[in-house]
């Protein structure tokens, strides 16, 4: 049969172990986020275009080229969650209700980028935003939290890269100096950097072109940064954060060229990269956005946050043997036993055992094959004769050993023999 429709380029279908892992990453993250005192919010996929133009920045790649707009309306599919959380915060006048909030969110984001491995048009964020404090302890908590989440899913091979852009004044001063310096050496820069220099000079620091990197290096005087560009207060915060990370034994790399592609950042910025990925190696990123709330019409309130990219986490974790498996597949030796089989599956599920059975009238052999395909730990075989004697058969699907068990002792047997491993015990 001809396949009539295919998925849109840059989107993913999750199935089998990927779907399982996707759920697991989300579940573990939520658990950790809650344990750090962050409260879940679920926000819409659609927002006003202006929110991101103003929040993320008119000259950024995201706003300029990547937003999916609903035709004829000033509505877009959200490209990120930070501006959206601030919209929610201001819309509900939360600043008047409490001076400090911690939120987290999970869900799809949309960016019309050129798809490639790890770069999608629809991807998923696990994000956290803490609003109302300028404490460097909060920066440390945000960094620690993002690393804890990665630890919990087994992603240990990664790099944490940190920089400080300073307050708005520091940032403006730095941009002025950068632009003035690079303008003089414009002829050495690539074409893209010519455009960046006019529109968003900080992005020149991201350029991978060798000649551009040479020019940037000579401007940055890497050793002296960031004392040269940060005011004493911002430099103190930066030093304190670094000292705290040292105390917590969190390893990091300081990179004065880390600027991030969203305009709202001030002071601390960070990125976590995976050693397992290629060009698109950032698995998460974040930082302070002390000016964003004010720029979106609110009071002058500081904030900090991060977002992890779920698809990139899955890519970095690689293929896994963690598959959704069943504890028990119930097999009946004849159609007349279907009802008993159905009842036993129901009893098992109510006791928290992951159980299933065949719904297509397969033969005994066919049902056993299905039990194998579903990676069941045991087949529970119901035979006419055994049932008449008040018993059933348990077949261990790994070593093929069989055991006769009393019908009334099924749950007891499960309790003693099933290892509720990675997939956990059913909680319905
Ligand atoms: P971001 O760096 O744009 O930051 O996105 C965070 C993470 O999302 C990236 O590190 C990456 O793992 C993933 N990601 C981004 N774009 C794509 C894509 N096209 N395909 C697959 N994965 C992608 C933000 O969005 C900020 N809102 C983070 C933040 C929260 N800053 C403060 N609070």
Image (cartoon, rainbow, N blue to C red):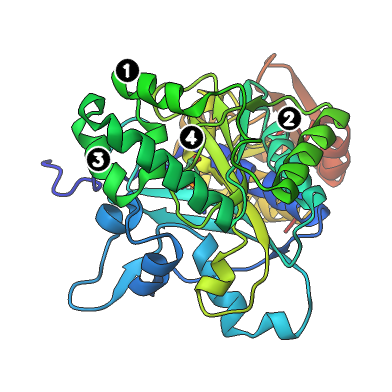
Considering only order in the chain, which callout, 1 or 2, is on the residue closer to the N terminus? 1
Where is 183 relative to 154, above or below? below
Q: Residues within 10 Å of mark 1 (few under 14, many from 20)?
A: few
Q: Which residue is mark 4?
A: 312
Q: Residues within 10 Å of mark 4 (few under 14, many from 20)?
A: many
Q: Which mark is residue 394?
A: 2
Considering only order in the chain, which callout, 1 or 3, is on the residue closer to the N terminus? 3
Give the number of the mark in front: 2 or 1: 1
Q: Which residue is mark 1?
A: 210
Nearer-the-camera pick, 47 or 396 = 47
Give the number of the mark in front: 3 or 4: 3
Percent coordinates x, y for residue 90 in the rendering: 59, 80
Instruction: Check the picture and name the quadrant holding the C terminus.
Output: bottom right
Considering only order in the chain, which callout, 4 or 3, is on the residue closer to the N terminus? 3
The quadrant in which residue 75 appears is: bottom left
**Disc 4 residue lies near ligand 1 with CB under 8 A:** yes
Secondary structure found at label 3: loop
């Amino acid at each position: 049969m001809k396949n009539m429709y295919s998925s849109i380029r840059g989107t993913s279908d999750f199935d089998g172990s990927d779907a399982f892992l996707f759920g697991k990453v989300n579940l573990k993250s939520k658990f950790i986020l809650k344990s750090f005192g962050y409260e879940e919010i679920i926000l819409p996929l659609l927002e006003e275009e202006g929110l991101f133009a103003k929040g993320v920045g008119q000259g950024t790649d995201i706003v300029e080229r990547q937003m999916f707009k609903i035709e004829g309306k000033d509505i877009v599919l959200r490209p990120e969650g930070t501006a959206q959380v601030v919209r929610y915060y201001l819309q509900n006048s939360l600043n008047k209700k409490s001076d400090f909030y911690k939120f987290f969110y999970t869900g799809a984001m949309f960016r019309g980028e050129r798809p490639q491995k790890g770069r999608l048009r629809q991807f998923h964020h696990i994000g956290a935003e803490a609003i109302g404090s300028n404490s460097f302890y909060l920066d440390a908590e945000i960094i620690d939290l993002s690393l804890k989440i990665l630890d919990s899913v087994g992603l240990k091979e990664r790099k944490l890269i940190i920089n400080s852009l300073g307050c708005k004044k520091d940032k403006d001063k730095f941009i002025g100096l950068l632009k003035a310096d690079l303008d003089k050496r414009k002829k050495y820069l690539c074409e893209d950097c010519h455009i960046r220099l006019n529109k968003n000079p900080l992005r020149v620091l991201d350029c991978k072109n060798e000649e551009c990197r040479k020019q940037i290096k000579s401007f940055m005087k890497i050793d002296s940064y960031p004392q040269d560009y940060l005011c004493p207060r911002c430099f103190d915060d930066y030093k304190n954060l670094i000292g705290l990370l040292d105390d917590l034994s969190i390893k990091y790399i300081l990179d004065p060229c880390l600027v991030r592609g969203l305009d709202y950042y001030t002071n601390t910025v960070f990125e976590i990269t995976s050693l397992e990925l290629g060009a698109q190696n950032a698995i998460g990123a974040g930082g302070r956005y002390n000016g964003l709330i004010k720029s979106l019409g609110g009071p002058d309130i500081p904030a900090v946050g991060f977002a992890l990219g779920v698809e990139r986490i899955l890519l970095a974790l690689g293929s896994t043997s963690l598959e959704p498996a069943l504890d028990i597949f119930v097999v009946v030796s004849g159609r007349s036993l279907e009802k008993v089989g159905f009842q036993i599956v129901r009893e098992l599920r109510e006791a928290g055992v992951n159980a299933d059975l065949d719904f297509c009238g397969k033969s005994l052999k066919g049902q056993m094959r299905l039990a194998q395909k579903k990676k069941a730990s045991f087949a529970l075989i119901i035979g006419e004769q055994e049932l008449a004697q008040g018993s059933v058969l348990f077949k261990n699907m790994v070593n093929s050993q069989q055991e006769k068990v009393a019908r009334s002792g099924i749950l007891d047997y499960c309790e003693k023999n099933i290892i509720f491993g990675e997939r956990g015990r059913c909680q319905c």
